[in-house]
Amino acid sequence: VILPLMGLGLAVYFYSAPENFNEEMLRGKRVIVTGASSGIGEQMAYHLARMGAHVLVTARTEAKLQKVVERCRELGAASARFVSGSMEDTAFAEEVVKEAENTWGGLDMLILNHIGHSYFNYFDGDVDHIRKLLETNFLSYVAMTVTALPMLKESEGNIVVVSSVAGKAPGPFAAPYSATKFALDGFFSSLRHEFIIENVNVSITLCILGYIDTDNAMQAVSHAIKVAPSPKEECALEIIRSGALRQHELHYPPGIVNGMLLLRWSVEKINLTFLYSISSLNFVPSPL
Ligand code: NDP
């Protein structure tokens, strides 16, 4: 038992990661961004373009992706293209990675960011919805990782997985979404251990995000969450920065996880009605 643990400890100790972020690190890099037709994904595409990366963006809405690609070219992307389709279908997820392979002959960074539509309300008992959401929010992430891994091993690249505080500390009204985000942590944090044991020099960064001011998030929860959302532009930059620095986890805004874990502990220990009345979060489910 002790020898493998010592080996793991040494591997972690000698694991080298760059200490300081420099935007030049992304110049000429080949990057896939999923869920890039809006929100945080769109902002990541613009940052990467400005830094001179090659970007391949994907989502379902072709018209929006076309505009994102045009803007990326204006901002100075080394190249910009899109593939449209739904991540409910794992064959499509694999196709996106193949497109990168055919176009660039390799890949440096895989940013997994898309989410399928869910609801903010009491769990309605719909098992099919959870199955569908797991396909979109979890299995497509795994499928893209599997297909991209040979290229990422060759480039000693980065996998960036966008998750949420709901994937670390579950609150009410988001049971299906929360389940898919916990699945990401379980799978990718376990995989990271295996990479360290096997000396696979591909980094995995899990991004734990709080409330961000994207149109869709504000529409879904602004009536219920009274804290101010953080800006999507800054959030997008922090995600790219953490991936390039090969960090294991990003917590944005800073301190969010400590706050949520404290809230989780409190939820388990204190009477819920009392907690909600003192909390800055005023949970009100939206109508189905
Ligand atoms: P948005 O809703 O703005 O963007 C979601 C993206 O996913 C869009 O580009 C959408 O494009 C795409 N998408 C939706 N369904 C599918 C599908 N079936 N197949 C392929 N693509 C799809 O999300 P945010 O920018 O707010 O969130 C981005 C990430 O950040 C997510 O992983 C989310 O969980 C995480 N996060 C966000 C928070 C927030 O407050 N905003 C808080 C915590 C975490 P299209 O409709 O064209 O397919």
Image (cartoon, rainbow, N blue to C red):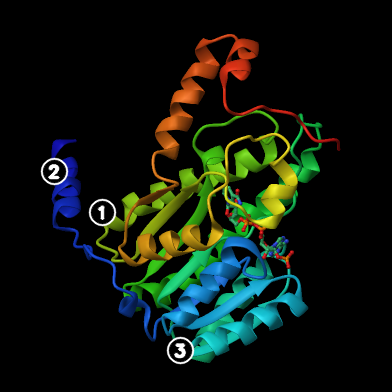
Q: CA distance from mark 1 to mark 3?
A: 28 Å
Instruction: From the image, tell me which residue sits under label 2.
Output: 6
The image quadrant that residue 140 belongs to is: bottom right
Label 3 environment density (alpha carbons within 10 Å; few <14, some 14–19, many ≥20): few
Q: Secondary structure at mark 2?
A: helix
Q: Is residue 280 above or below residue 127?
A: above
Q: Is residue 158 left or right of residue 278?
A: left
The residue labelled by disc 1 is: 197
Please name the residue that numbered disc 3 is placed on: 105
Secondary element at image label 1: helix
In the image, what residue occupies the spot 44% across and 24% down? 262
Mark 1 or mark 2, which has the lower sequence index? Answer: 2
**Residue 1 position within the rendered picture, expressed as x and y whole percent measured from the top left:** 19, 35
Relative to 241, is 266 on the left or the right?
A: right
Q: Amino acid at mark 2?
A: Met
How far, Cα to Cα, is label 3 from label 2? 38 Å
**Could you tell whether 275 is left or right of 149 in the image?**
right
Q: Is the CB atom of the residue marked by disc 2 within 8 angstroms of ligand 1's nearest atom?
A: no
Residue flagged by tag 1: what amino acid is it? Ile
Residue ranking furthest to the right? 288
Give 176 or 210, whichever is nearer the viewer.
210
Residue at point 65%, 56% (across, down): 115
Asked whether the beta carbons under mark 1 and mark 3 sit within 8 Å of each other, the answer is no
